[in-house]
Amino acid sequence: MSTRRPPTAPSRRGAFPRLHVTGWAPLVALAVLATSCAAPPTDIVVTGTVRDETVNVPVPSLVAPAVDLDAGFAADPTATDGASPPQAPAAPVLAGAVIVATVAVRQGAHVEAGDRLATLDSNAQKAAIAIAKADAAVADAQVAVLAQAIKDADDQAATLTNQRAKVVKAIGDLKKAQKALPAAQKKLSATRKQLAAKLAQLEQALASLPPPGTPVPPGVTLPDRDQLLQGIAQLKAALKQIDAGLKQLAAAKKQLATGLKKATSGLRKLDDARATLNDARAELRDLKKLAQVAADSSHVSIDTANWQAGLTTVTAPASGTIVSIVDAGTAHTPGSPLAVIRPDGPRLVDAWVTPAQRAQLALGDSATVQGDWMAASVSGSLRVIGVRATYPPSSTPSEETHLTRAFPITVQTSGTLPAGVPVTITFAR
């Protein structure tokens, strides 16, 4: 394409003034200036809101021994059905409501991780410990009885009559222990069922959590993932202990039956001759080992009861400020909030950006966070960029994203900011 030159002389059709070279110089200078002053990339400035992150401390699920309302009452002799109800031990049950005995902190107080928040009523758990210890004492007594029987057999090998009476007594004690095993198995099975149900609840709650880093809408509080994992680990450990105890009880039941059969055979040998006494003593030693297995299994119930008693002291899972906490003397259902803590540490700021702004951002971009109420700005880093554009909440104070689709972003700040306050985020370009 040819370039038109300015006229240097009047044409025949009209008179044009002569333009000198000096007249073109200002125009060329203006063109160069306009080219050199093209607008540089501008900073990305959006308005965000400091996320209100809280940790929920739930009321623990406690197991209490059931009360047998028929204890101490004889069967009705006038009953016409000819049968009386079985007097089986009552299995432990989940407490319907948990009473808060004392509260150690107040709303607005700062706590460190592990600080005591509240103490729950532990009368039922103390009773469970006493019952478990009593059962263990009975099992331990059976071991002592067998040990004494063996000692008496060693000392009185010549007195077959007395030795026979002691063996009979030992067999009777073992039969009592064998009769008590089903009740212990039933109690442990009931406890395992309850703990397994609680484990399923925690695992379901964990599975319902969104993946880490997923933005949570304002106002929505999710269970703490670390607390759920800790609770699941504790329940699995307790279930493992109970399963080991049930296995030991099952083995002990079979072994006790075998041992009783051997003891009866030994008793017959004692009636024949003194030589058979040595066989009886060996049998008694075997029975003592089996009784020891039963006694060791009974201590699983003590460990479970002590673990439950430890749950009555509720501690802070993280350092932070108490947002809310229940009052002493109030009753609450397991799983309901006992306290809410706003943890210490850097805050997250949620904001929205337009598609054009998102195209200029990348994870890890540095940002400056400033508020009208702040004496100085704090630094931040872009941690989350949404992958789907949607309409921001109507409360989002930004002209860029109002009534348009935008992408959510999350910035982690280097300092602690008040929850819920608006701030301005600037990404330098």
Image (cartoon, grey):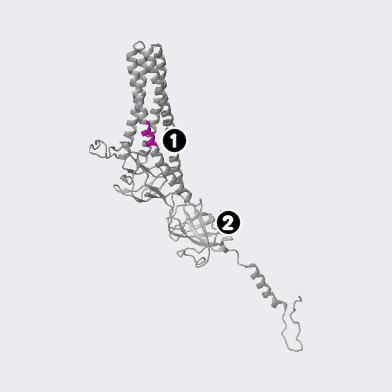
Instruction: Find the residue positioned furthest to the left.
Output: 78
Viewer-proximal residue among 255 and 346: 255
Answer left or right for 324 relative to 20: left
Q: Residue 32, position in %: x, y? A: 67, 70
Q: Earlier in the sequence, mark 2 or mark 1?
A: 1
User: What span is colored magenta in the figure?
Assistant: 181-188
Q: Would you say residue 352 is visible in this rendering?
A: yes
Viewer-proximal residue among 429 and 283: 283
Viewer-proximal residue among 107 and 6: 107
Above or below residue 403? Residue 184 is above
Under mark 2, the amino acid is: Ala
Viewer-proximal residue among 17 and 306: 306
Q: Residue 268, position in %: x, y? A: 38, 17
Q: Residue 289, position in %: x, y? A: 41, 23
Q: Quadrant of the C terminus?
A: bottom right
Q: CA distance from mark 2 to mark 1?
A: 51 Å
Residue tagged 1: 243
How packed mark 2 is, by other alpha carbons closer than 10 Å (few <14, some 14-19, many 20 or more), is few
Tell me the number on the disc at residue 362. Answer: 2
Under mark 1, the amino acid is: Asp
Helix, strand, or loop for circle 1?
helix
Helix, strand, or loop for circle 2?
loop
Q: Quadrant of the N terminus?
A: bottom right
Magenta span has 161? Answer: no
Answer left or right for 242 relative to 88: right
Above or below residue 283? Residue 78 is below
- Magenta span: helix, strand or loop, mainly? helix
- Identity of the residue drawn at 42% across and 33% down: 245
